[in-house]
Image (cartoon, rainbow, N blue to C red):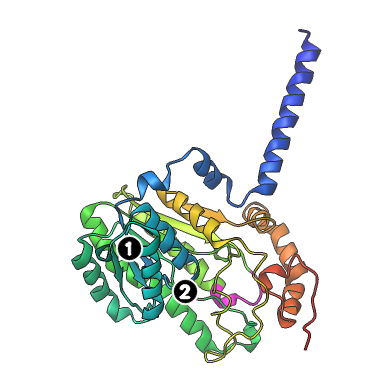
Amino acid sequence: MSWDLFLSLLLVCVLLYLGVQLVRFVRADGDLTLLWAEWQGRRPEWELSDMVVWVTGASSGIGEELAYQLSKLGTSLVLSSRRANELERVKNKCLEISNLKEKDILVLPLDLTDRSSHQAATKTVLQQFGHIDILVNNGGRSQRSLFKDTSLDVYKEIMELNFLGTISLTKCVLPHMMERKQGKIVTVSSILGFIGAPLAGGYCATKHALQGFFNCLRAELTTYPEITVTNICPGPVQSNIVHNAFTEDISKKLENVGSQEHKMATSRCVRLMLISIANDLKEVWISEQPFLTVCYIWQYAPTWAWWLTNKLANRRIENFKNGVDADSSYFKPLKKKTN
């Protein structure tokens, strides 16, 4: 084989490889490390069965789906949120779709903003199961309002719930994990934990705070290598998070929710979360395109990211005012409300 022919074949192989990787990236719904773990990493079915998992925000959305998928893996569950009746509904479905028994699921109503109750709640879990293998900090609320219109009480409340409530519960559970020298702390953050978007200033602030806090905590736990800290950063996912979002006033509910059909299926998001937990990944991005590309731009080309955000900010705001879901407004044409 001549040298020229060899170089030509090598070039063709390189171009084919790059083409395949491009196609994979266009179709990706998670960051490259996560997708590698899905392909070659440890399976949740191997790693998470027979563990005790405490899930906050378990009455709907991602938390509810987590309960269902974990129950099928055979994990013992602690289900927490403020709505006891909804937790019972989730528990009953877990029992229907899995081999778990009544004793394997503890319904534990919990208000994350009532920090004085967290220590007692932790003792209740330990009395029931003896240990806690995984804490999934999933409870929280989103926001849809402009800063100029929003009461400071909203920012206080969302910080109390999303940030202080989460680290309070973690502070109660961590000593137990340190005593056992093992455990997993999983926090559902958001891609808005490292990027910014209009209409969600308070929500972004809490998620940025969670990212910073748990990155620091991970560094503080280097002498406990079997205690892992994972930050999960989903993009738009089909859940009730928009329905329950804060607005400009504490007492006001969001009127224009918009269609959620364009968002990632909750079941797929949770499956990728379980893969992340099983493989002890430190931070993962779970999002379909084009949001995943936006994450990479923010990470590696922040100047371009700011330019793109500023270009599209008014479009997002106007779409929201016209009843179009804010998460779709960057990429879909304006649709006027019809009476």
Camera-nearest residue between 216 and 287: 287
Q: Residue at x 36, y 75 (%)?
A: 88
Residue 130 numbered tag: none
Q: Is residue 112 left or right of residue 10?
A: left
Compared to residue 258, the image places residue 309 above or below, namely above
Label 2 amino acid? Gly
Q: Secondary structure at mark 1?
A: strand
Residue 146, quarter of the rendered image = bottom right
Task: Give the residue at x 71% y 41%.
Answer: 22
Q: Say which label, 1 or 2, has the lower sequence index.
A: 1
The answer to whether residue 10 is left or right of residue 206 is right
Determine the residue positioned at 20% across, 61% down: 130
Which residue is the site of mark 1?
77
Q: Which residue is mark 2?
A: 140
**Quadrant placement of the C terminus:** bottom right
Q: Which residue extends farthest bottom?
A: 251
Q: Residue furthest top?
A: 1
Asked if residue 136 is positioned above or below residue 124 in the image, the reply reads above
